[in-house]
Amino acid sequence: MKFALLPFLLVTATLLAATLLTATIASGQSAAPGGVTSEWDIRKLLDSLDLEAQHLKPIIDQVKPDTWAAKGASSTYIAQWKSAEAELKYLLSSSEALARQPEKLTSALDTYFRMQAMESTVSSVVEGVRKYQNPALANLMQSALGENSANRDRLRQYVQDLAAQKEQELQVADREAQRCRDTLVKQPSAKKAVQK
């Protein structure tokens, strides 16, 4: 009997911790002073990130790496440019997923990593634009990337805070499960109670 109750208690403790987190996030408050950013602030951050990324799209669309070969450019710039376009789309879609579920750590990580990948790829293309197309356009691309650096830093901090919060929740659930397990172990078994 006591071992049948153990999984129930573990699930109950985990659900309690998750319910407290969801209620905290739904109320729009940080989970703790100095804790995870509120859902409202994360939505504003994601809106800003999306806006900056959408400003970058028409600039990337002006890049014409297929014409650079005549100037001695490597054909790898074409692949990098296509990759930059794809990374921008991936960033926008992962950002939308995070906006739907801001408490989901995997979505936050995906958005952050997509942002880093997009910035890295666009930075590679910038050098080609500067050398083979138009230095002013390269400067514009670099500037657009720079405008989003504050958003990247805030997103990185959110990911770190969210991961720390999830770690704390697991520790609380584990302690509660251990407490429940100890309580069950200390209870007299049904056979011993009947024999007395």
Image (cartoon, grey):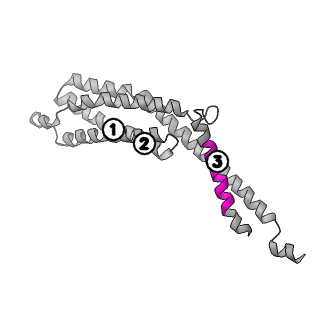
Q: Position of residue 73 (x, y in %)?
A: 15, 37
Question: For the point 71% across and 57% down, which residue is it?
Answer: 178
Q: Earlier in the sequence, mark 2 or mark 1?
A: 2
Tell me, yes or no, whether the two marked residues, 3 and 1, touch with CB atoms within 8 Å.
no
Q: Position of residue 153 (x, y in %)?
A: 46, 31
Question: For the point 86% across and 72% down, which residue is it?
Answer: 193
Question: For the point 56% across and 38% down, which residue is it?
Answer: 161
Q: Is residue 15 magenta?
A: yes
**Label of residue 97 in the image:** 2
Q: Is disc 1 placed on a helix, strand or loop?
A: helix
Query: Which residue is the site of mark 1?
Result: 118
Q: CA distance from mark 3 to mark 1?
A: 35 Å
Query: Which residue is the site of mark 3?
Result: 17
The quarter of the picture where the N terminus appears is bottom right
Q: Which residues are magenta?
A: 7-21
Q: Is residue 135 left or right of residue 169?
A: left
Q: Earlier in the sequence, mark 3 or mark 2?
A: 3
Q: In this view, which residue lies farthest toward the right?
A: 196
Please name whichever residue, 109 or 132, is drawn nearer the observer in this view of the structure: 109
Q: In this view, which residue lies farthest toward the bottom?
A: 195
Q: Which amino acid type is shown beneath numbered disc 2?
A: Ala
Q: Residues within 10 Å of mark 2 (few under 14, many from 20)?
A: some
Q: Which amino acid type is shown beneath numbered disc 3?
A: Ala
